[in-house]
Amino acid sequence: MSKPSPNLSTPGGSPTIVLPDLGDETVFVVDDDPNVLNSAKSFLTRLGYNVKAFEDPKEAVAAIGREAPKVIVTDNEMPGMTGLELADGVQSLDPTIKIIMVTGVGDEAAAQAALRLGLSDYLTKPIDLSEMARAVQKAFMEYTLDEYEEEMDAWIRAEVVHQTEVIRDVTLSTLATLVNALEARSSHFKGHSENVAIAAAGIARALELSEVEVRSVRTAGLLHDVGMIAVPDSVVDKPGALDEAERRAVLAHCARGAEILEPMEHLGRAITYVLEHHERIDGSGYPDGKRGADISLGGQIVGLAEVWIALTEPRPYRAAMSKADAMGTLVGAAGSWFSAEILEALRVSES
């Protein structure tokens, strides 16, 4: 299948982007167990993917130039070449290919190595086919995002003289669509970013900020979790405590989100707010441990809005709080996580 391209208008028109059919793409499945291999191939083929199966990982690597896969699902423990070795070799040949690693239960070393290599996801044995389907779909989403980052950047440069406002709107709309697709991975997160955007805009208006700044914090609220594309589904939906590797993957999402948005200069201060939305005024936040006034006002607003919405939404590990209980929790954080002024603006906006 040829590389999908954005369906873009000529200057003066209304540009749109049509995402590709994620099922009409090539997936390599690599496993030395023929029963597992055939089961995975049959399942993914029924979902509409073009599946190539390999018992020998070296044959899979050799076939990359001929078949041009976009996603590889590989076992780790295989004779002759481990899945991690395969991943390292594949990334040298074509770093755009997304790799999903299958590890044994309790194989923490392999899971951590997969995270360090930046693999798309890792699954544990025995393989849950529904989890495999979600991981493969997510990998294609990542591949599509990478393609469109490059194409959108080139398009923006060509069109910016003609359609600055239209470009802003379509870029935001496209990224919001991607965020919605990511949030659909878990019922607990559906609509989360839109709710954060609404809450952030309400706080900004209660603080009597300009409409330009209200729009910036709303945009940052909408896009604050775009960096979660790098976090495996197994971590997003985990009901218990995260291990150290999983925690690092989550902590990286702020910086990853800012990196994704950085080429889109018209987003302005919203990119900084995405980067800083987990910073806290007592220095206990991340990614940089900023304190007090070193954190932008917009970053503090989006951070408070995100925590407010998170507390009042259900999570895999707890039920949703009532608004009264959530507000009480936040008031207890006044002066440490958030300033009293911004907390009061939240209270006013929610009253």
Image (tube, helix red, strand yellow):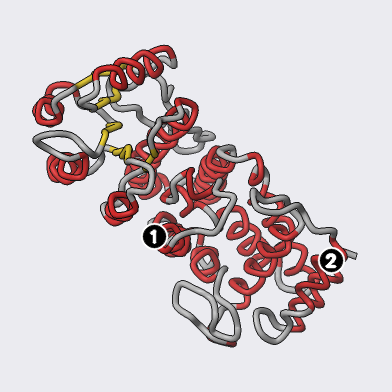
Badge 2: how crowded within 10 Å, few (<14), some, or many (20+)?
few
Q: Earlier in the sequence, mark 1 or mark 2?
A: 1
Residue drawn where x is 53% and y is 49% of the image = 236
Amino acid under disc 1? Ala
Judging depth in this view, the residue of 318 and 218 nearest the camera is: 318
Please provide percent x and percent y for residue 50: 31, 16
Residue drawn where x is 10% and y is 25% of the image = 59
Specify the label residue 107 is tagged with. none
- Quarter of the picture containing the C terminus is bottom right
Residue marked by disc 1: 245
Give the Cα separation between the discs numbered 1 and 2: 32 Å
Residue marked by disc 2: 325
Q: Is residue 243 left or right of residue 186?
A: left
Judging depth in this view, the residue of 171 and 157 nearest the camera is: 171
Residue drawn where x is 67% and y is 56% of the image = 197
Q: Which residue lies furthest to the front in this view?
A: 106
Judging depth in this view, the residue of 321 and 265 nearest the camera is: 321
